[in-house]
Image: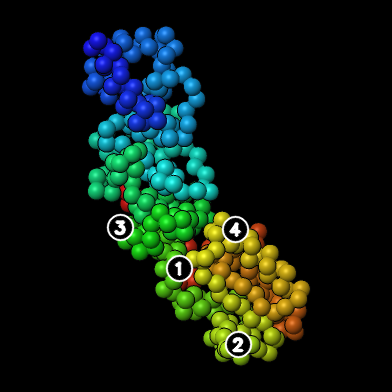
Amino acid sequence: MRRQRVFRAACELADEQAGVISLDQLRGLGVTRAQVRAQVAARRWRRIHTLVVATHTGPLGGRARWWAAVLEGGPQAYLDGASALVAEGLKGFEVGSIRVSVPASDRARRPSGVTMRRTRRHDPSVVLRTGIPRTSPPVAAVRGALWAQSDKQAVLLLTMCVQQGLATAEQVGLAALAVRRDRRRNLVHGVVLDLLDGVRALSEAEFARECELRGLPAPSRQVRRQVPGGSVYLDAYWEKWGVVVEIDGIQHTWAASVVGDALRQNSITLARDVVLRLPLLGLRLAPDEFFAQIEQALRDRGCPLVATSPDPASGRAAIGSLGEPLRSTSAGLSW
């Protein structure tokens, strides 16, 4: 009877963890290693990693893999970065290796499919323990951006976190303030400012500065025009050549498609109109392509320009929050 109660308790705990349980948890419930080996040998259970077993022999789903990764890391391990956001409910973002953080004093194992890192700044206050242990969405978004494979991936992760309601821009901003030094610190701050919609004037000044750097004539800014139903203000206007650029925010556009959609829209507009749209993400992710279209529009309408925009294939650095190219540094992560 006692053995049945012990195994029932083990299975109930495993069910709460998507069908997986650690050897330490089994030991705490009174299940011996010999009994575990017997269950595995009988093919009722199977080993997952080194310190985790599944109480079934079927395939592991996503939540089971997350639980197994955290349990392998020990009682203080937790999902971090993009993995924590996906576990929280982030949609449309692919994560390769599962990211798990453990305190610096713990042993960082290397299970297959898991990136386990020790951190000197283990802070239990930012770890959610309801369900799968994971960092809170604002902290996970910032860390995920710092650890992303590219600047573009970093921008997408921050933007999608806010757009899907996992955290507010203010919460992400507060988490970003904890970053003392990192090669993407300026990029993260710039994206957060865009998400806060508090830098529209700054973005227009940034656009004008970029025009100057590329040898384009200075546009008039915030020009009032009468339209049916009232008046509007044009962000940037070359009146002599009839070219208008509208600088769009990013709060109401899906991050994964905004740049490509705007480029396609501009290509169509060039053939039939003179109004081009430049998303703030465009200034950070694809400045060369957008400014090449602006230059083409000006030249097609008689502006005497020589070739000024860099070749998009040249790999020009993305623009930082003050219009300056972002430069990598040797500084490590602050976490």
Is 307 displayed left or right of 283 in the figure?
right
Q: Earlier in the sequence, mark 3 or mark 2?
A: 3
Question: How far is the residue under mark 3 from the one under mark 1?
Answer: 19 Å
Is 332 displayed left or right of 105 in the figure?
right
> Does residue 296 sit above or below 218 in this rendering?
above
Residue 275, position in %: x, y? 66, 78
In what quadrant of the picture does the N terminus appear? top left
Residue 334, position in %: x, y? 32, 51
> Does residue 304 sit above or below 109 in this rendering?
below
Q: Nearer the viewer, mark 2 or mark 1?
A: 2
Question: How far is the residue under mark 3 from the one under mark 2?
Answer: 47 Å
Classed neighbour count for the residue bearing mark 2: other residues with Cα under 10 Å, few (<14), some (14–19), many (≥20)? few
Q: What kind of residue is marked 4?
A: Ser
Question: How far is the residue under mark 1 from the one under mark 4?
Answer: 17 Å
Q: Earlier in the sequence, mark 2 or mark 4?
A: 2
Q: What kind of residue is marked 2?
A: Gly
Q: Nearer the viewer, mark 3 or mark 2?
A: 2
Question: How far is the residue under mark 2 from the one under mark 1?
Answer: 29 Å
Element type where label 4 sits in the image = helix
| Residue highlighted by disc 4 | 257
Q: Residue 194 — which label?
A: 1
Residue 85 visible somewhere in the drawing: yes
